[in-house]
Image (cartoon, rainbow, N blue to C red):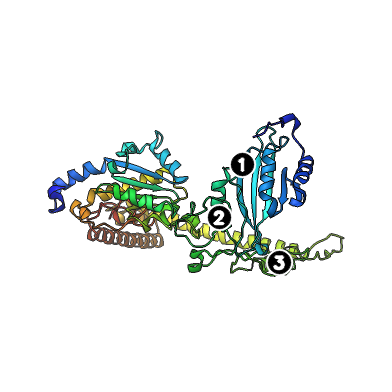
Amino acid sequence: MGLMDQVELPQPVKYVFNWGRKYSLWCFNFGLACCAIEFIAASTSRHDFIRHGVIPFAHGPRQADLLVVSGTLTDKMAPAVKRLYEEMAEPKYVISFGSCANCGGPYWDSYSVTKGVDQIIPVDVYVPGCPPRPEALLDGIIALQHRIQNESLKDRIAGRRLDPVTLGADAPLALEGSSS
Amino acid sequence: MTDVLARRDRALTPEETEELLRDRLGDGVQRSVLEFGVFTVWIAQEAWVAAARACRDEPLLAYDLFDNAFGVDAREEGFDYVAILYSTSTGNRIVLRTRCEGGREAPVCPSMVEVYRGADWMERETWDMFGIDFPGHPSVSPRILTVENFEGWPLRKDFHLASRAAKPWPGVAEPKEMDDEGNIIEREKRIGDAPGPYELDKVMGEQAKLANPLPEPPAVTEEGEEVTATAQSADLASDSGKVLAGEQERGLEEEQKLRHDADVELAGDEAEREPTTGEQASDEANQGGSAIAAAEAAKKADDRRRTQAEARAKKAAERAAADESGDDPAGPDDPEGDA
């Protein structure tokens, strides 16, 4: 990473650098249940999140910037998600897509379902819904891009993360990032 | 494997199948049930593997596909183990079912793996979920569906869900049967009854009684018309309501019209004559030709001047307020203006 993890970039450089990063999110889809179908719908021509610079063809976690956990995470699967997340290179981002990935969803009292992916890995954006529509994923991606645009890479590399965004629960998207 | 004599057009009926199995297994066949198109044969525990072997090797049966297997919680009576077999040559499907020995504490069922290799993982899963042990199975552990260090048998009806210890089940208690009058038939609590806090049955019983009251004899008027008290009162209420509402509405309308007329008059006057209010008043007075008319016109003009001054002052105050709140032209009405 060179200097970037030691000094704060000058504002203009930071702006251009983050602008470049936010429109090149190589995305690794961890599809676990029906939400993965909505993710696929978002990646195809109708909703087309590639126009937002999200590239859904990462060959593996090592080539990915963004992990989208879409679906029901079970205790049996949790170590695999943890390992794949740790294989990703920093800076890396996580979108928790759907109620199951957010909190266990309808399986809140199940004997085998993890109560939210945030129990094992840090999440940047929560997209609620059961399943959420593809538009909700687009909204989540835009929220994440706002976040990337305004973040300090030095902080990110040092592991200082902002609080996660929950779509629909936090401030309106127009205010997210454009304040400060 | 022996020669297969079974053919689709010569498939045995359930009765013939049971007869054949009884012939081969004797008392091993306990009973059989044919319901919903599913033929179930209850097998004694001792004859379990022999029954599977007979089903596979008997030329007229030829159940060559191990389709499915699972456990069933039979509450106080322990556990059942069910295996479904399919014959690709006859197209028949048979369900073998046995009651496990050992009750709820240590249920045990002989393994079918030596007959059907496909039973291997089915039995492992059944052990995983119900804790039924399978002597003769290569190894039922480690767990394959739950995590390796999982404790308990999750599909048993008396399994306690950890999440519900922290947050109780929000639903209703186990529904109970009701007789025709809405009285609840009491029975003892069984293993696996839903532990909900809400007694749905009692509430539903009350509601059922309210919803279906005993029919009252209808009242009869002098003309012989049948009029119920509720209908009469409803008619009265709706009529009186209409009258009142109409009157109120009309009053409101008139008031609004008056106010509107006054506004229009004022605006028109303002546009017509800004500097010449006095002149106009005197003109009016001349035309009227009488002192009373002149006095009235003067008074009117005075009134107009006063209202105009008031309106102007109000506008000025508003403008000042807008200036103070910032140079936002949209003003405080625009919700996104300050964002």
Q: In the image, what residue type sits under mark 3?
A: Gly
Give coordinates of residue B215: x percent, y percent: 81, 64
Q: Is residue A27 above or below residue A124?
A: above
The mark nearer the N terminus, 1 or 3, is 1
Q: Are marks 1 and 3 on the same chain?
A: yes
Give coordinates of residue B331: x percent, y percent: 29, 55
Q: Output the chain of dot 1.
A: B
Residue topped by disc 3: B205
Residue topped by disc 2: B127
Local crowd at mark 3 within 10 Å, few (<14), some, or many (≥20)?
some
Give coordinates of residue B274: x percent, y percent: 29, 52
The mark nearer the N terminus, 1 or 2, is 1
Which residue shows up at 52% across the image and 57% down it? B253
Local crowd at mark 1 within 10 Å, few (<14), some, or many (≥20)?
many
Tell me the distance, in whole angstroms, between the alpha carbons under discs 1 and 2. Answer: 18 Å
Q: What count of labels does the image hold?
A: 3
Q: Output the chain of dot 3.
A: B
Tell me the distance, in whole angstroms, between the alpha carbons under discs 3 and 2. Answer: 42 Å
Residue topped by disc 1: B66
Which residue shows up at 75% across the image and 48% down it? B33
Q: Output the chain of dot 2.
A: B
**Residue B190 picture quarter:** bottom right
Question: Does residue A119 appear in the picture of this structure?
Answer: yes
